[in-house]
Amino acid sequence: NAVNLLLMEAMLAQQPRLTLISAALPEVGLQRAREQRPDLILLDIELPGIDGFEVLRQLRADEGTQGIPVIAVSANAMPADIERGLAAGFDAYLTKPIDQCVLVAAVQSALHRASARAESVASAASRGIAAGSARSISRRRAVSRDQASRDSSALNRSASVSNSSPAPLGSIPAPTTR
């Protein structure tokens, strides 16, 4: 819903070089992730049509998106829900209502880990090791988040966060924070 999207934008607006890009449906979010190859995806578990676990499975099965860190955002906050999410392969699991400090810390941590992995792979590739792997987790100019929820405290039907460096984002309208 639009109010929750505004809330997420406000939480991330104070972070330099991040832009929010949203998608109304998980299928649209998957397509944007494949096209833009973002640095990070924030993904709600409760999505219309397919759930966040299936979206994660599809992201991990795709060579172009398998290395993108994915953080779960969910109203499902029981310990078993969190354990299931982490066991499924989410890099982190945030519960609603989202605490801004926790969100920012999780985003920064995931981006830092992804950047370190990309540098490591690039270094190995420059030495002739695992050259094919460097492409799938290389640092990109977009941080994406696809998430949705029917819950009134949800963040949006689906959304993405993008690094606002001068990379073209195509026709996707994305508010930029500096």
Image: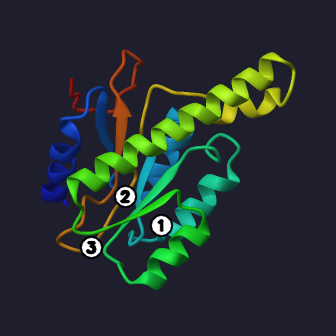
Instruction: Kindly identify which residue carries mark 1.
Output: 52
Whether label 1 touches label 2, CB < 8 Å: yes
- Looking at marks 1 and 3 on the same chain, the residue that comes earlier in the sequence is marked by 1
- Name the kind of residue labelled 1 in the image: Gly
Instruction: Kindly identify which residue carries mark 2.
Output: 147
Whether label 3 touches label 2, CB < 8 Å: no
How many labels sit on residues? 3
Q: What element carries label 1?
A: helix
Q: In this view, does 127 lie above or below 30?
A: above
- Name the kind of residue labelled 2 in the image: Gln
Q: In this view, does 44 lie above or below 2?
A: below
Instruction: Kindly identify which residue carries mark 3.
Output: 150
Residue 133: horizontal and vertical position, in percent?
76, 34
Question: Front-most of 58 and 97?
Answer: 97
* Numbered tag placed on residue 4 in the rendering: none
Residue found 87% across the figure and 20% down from its top: 128
- Name the kind of residue labelled 3 in the image: Arg
Q: What element carries label 3?
A: loop
Residue found 34% across the figure and 55% down from its top: 158
Question: Front-most of 173 and 131?
Answer: 131
Disc 2 packing (10 Å; few <14; some 14–19; many ≥20): many
Q: In this view, does 151 lie above or below 155?
A: below
Q: Residues under labels 1 and 2: Cα distance? A: 8 Å
Disc 1 packing (10 Å; few <14; some 14–19; many ≥20): many
Can you say which quadrant of the picture contains the N terminus?
bottom left
> Which residue occupies the extreme right position in the image?
128
Residue 118: horizontal and vertical position, in percent?
63, 30
Q: In this view, does 91 lie above or below 168?
A: below
Disc 3 packing (10 Å; few <14; some 14–19; many ≥20): some
